[in-house]
Image (spheres, grey):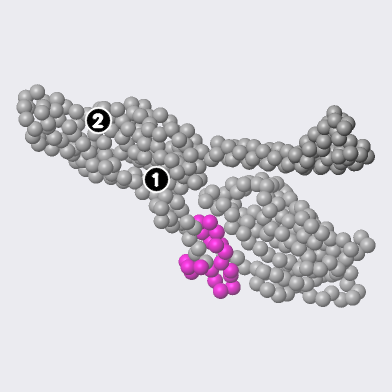
């Protein structure tokens, strides 16, 4: 297109300069028509070029935005900074997932704890924060050759072991078994390392979820009654006494598993004046039909439903604990309200989640062990006249523990 425009311009200039060749040159109208076509072609080319330029700018902006988000994600996907060893060194500066950090102690010190720690997917470090303890050496100037030396027997026991010492060219080196360290009293005695005390609240978390028991050369985790130690040896898993039949509930009671135990419950239909109820399922009672002339009976609840929940102590709030829904609406209005005393209103509230559903909300944590009850009433109204009431009783068995 550009060559075509140049040819037209050249032809105009040539004919203007050489009038003698007028018989071979196009007329003025033809030249003007050609120039208009060239102008249209140039305009179309300019529009296409501008559109391509705008598209390129959009792609560059998108790439810059994507790079910014990726950089932000990369910056945030790191483990916390590890403490520097006293009397030692930390090798490795990257705190990104999958990277390792190694620890070395200065001469005269030995490492107690994890020699290598890895940044995990959970953005926490594996292992425990190590420390450097003094490594005791004794110089024996009378020795002139390498030899194994036998020292007087030290006091031994499950938490005290004799050290293993070797004399090399006049210098005696003493070491201990894993889980022990040289005693501060002398180099011939190894004292047990109390891991439970040393790593009680390390940066990587507690050694044990519940309780740590120090053992000779190591430690073990224990769990309270109603829990088993998990495979990793550190956490606790609830025992389902109901599923494993480790309960003493009678035949007319229902076993409810809780965190760390169980509860035996029995649902009895309420006794209310002017109405009688019959159990239609293990957890539901419905009102018998009311006589036509008995208006007091028609104002009593149509049904009572009972629900039991097991929760841990100090469960975070706010959160939805239970939902109450109407399968079909008889009246023109549904109302949801919270019944009960001060305890229920201190911990719960009722909110509507949609036209036919209300939800019981936990608004403040409950410190266990405790049993907390709440009642949700769903009322149906037709032109502001009550046509039905339905009570849902929710009982929370709160554990003594937060796991």
- Under circle 1, the secondary element is strand
Query: Mark 1 or mark 2, which is nearer to you?
Result: 2
Q: Nearer the viewer, residue 179 or 191?
A: 179
The stretch of residues the image draws in magenta is: 243-263
Q: What residue is drawn where x is 89% and y is 69%?
A: 295
Instruction: Give the percent coordinates (x, y) of residue 121.
Output: 49, 46
Q: Is residue 369 left or right of residue 197?
A: right
**Quick one: label 1 or label 2, which is nearer the N terminus?**
2
Give the residue pinned by disc 2.
Answer: 135
Q: Main secondary structure of the magenta part?
A: loop
Q: Is residue 269 above or below residue 47?
A: below
Q: What residue is drawn where x is 62% and y is 68%?
A: 266
Q: Is residue 387 left or right of residue 80?
A: right
Q: What residue is drawn where x is 46% and y is 47%?
A: 209
Q: Nearer the viewer, residue 252 or 131?
A: 131
Instruction: Give the percent coordinates (x, y) of residue 385.
Output: 91, 63
Instruction: Give the percent coordinates (x, y) of residue 203.
Output: 45, 37
Q: Is residue 144 left or right of residue 262?
A: left
Residue 90 sits in quarter: top left
Residue 14 sits in quarter: top right
Q: Characterize the local packing of mark 2: few (<14), some (14-19) or many (20 or more) Cα atoms within 10 angstroms.
A: some
Q: Nearer the viewer, residue 94 or 116?
A: 94
Give the residue pinned by disc 1.
Answer: 212
Q: Is residue 124 above or below residue 302?
A: above
């Amino acid at each position: 297109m550009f060559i075509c425009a140049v040819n037209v311009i050249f032809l105009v200039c040539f004919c203007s300069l050489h009038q003698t060749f007028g018989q071979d040159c196009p007329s003025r109208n033809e030249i003007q028509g050609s120039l208009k076509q060239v102008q249209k072609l140039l305009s179309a080319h300019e529009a296409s070029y501008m559109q391509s330029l705008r598209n390129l700018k959009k792609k560059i902006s998108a790439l810059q935005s994507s790079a910014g988000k990726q950089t932000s994600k990369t910056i945030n996907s790191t483990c916390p900074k590890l403490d520097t060893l006293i009397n030692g060194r930390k090798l490795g500066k990257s705190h990104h997932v999958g990277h390792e950090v190694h620890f070395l102690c200065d001469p005269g010190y030995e490492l107690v704890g994890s020699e290598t720690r890895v940044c995990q997917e959970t953005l926490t470090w594996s292992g425990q924060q190590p420390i450097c303890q003094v490594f005791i050496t004794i110089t024996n100037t009378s020795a002139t050759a390498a030899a194994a030396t036998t020292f007087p027997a030290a006091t031994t026991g499950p938490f005290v072991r004799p050290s293993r010492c070797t004399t090399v060219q006049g210098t005696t080196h003493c070491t201990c078994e894993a889980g022990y360290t040289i005693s501060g009293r002398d180099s011939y005695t190894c004292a047990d390392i109390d891991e439970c005390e040393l790593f009680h609240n390390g940066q990587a978390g507690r050694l044990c979820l519940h309780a740590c028991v120090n053992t000779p050369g190591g430690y073990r985790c224990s769990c309270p009654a109603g829990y088993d130690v998990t495979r990793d040896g550190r956490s606790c898993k609830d025992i389902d006494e109901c599923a494993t039949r480790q309960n003493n509930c009678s035949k007319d009671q229902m076993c409810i598993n809780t965190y760390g135990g169980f509860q035996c419950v029995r649902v009895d239909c309420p006794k209310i004046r002017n109405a009688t109820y019959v159990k239609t399922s293990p957890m539901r009672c419905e009102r018998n039909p009311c006589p036509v002339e008995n208006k007091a009976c028609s104002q009593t609840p149509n049904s009572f439903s009972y629900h039991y929940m097991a929760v841990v102590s100090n469960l975070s709030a706010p959160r939805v604990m239970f939902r109450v829904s109407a399968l079909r609406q008889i009246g023109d209005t549904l109302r949801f309200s919270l019944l009960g005393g001060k305890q229920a209103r201190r911990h719960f509230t009722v909110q509507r989640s949609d036209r036919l559903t209300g939800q019981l909300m936990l608004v403040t944590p409950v410190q266990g062990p405790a049993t907390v009850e709440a009642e949700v009433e769903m009322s149906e109204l037709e032109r502001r006249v009550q046509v039905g009431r339905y009570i849902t009783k929710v009982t929370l068995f709160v554990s003594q523990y937060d796991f």
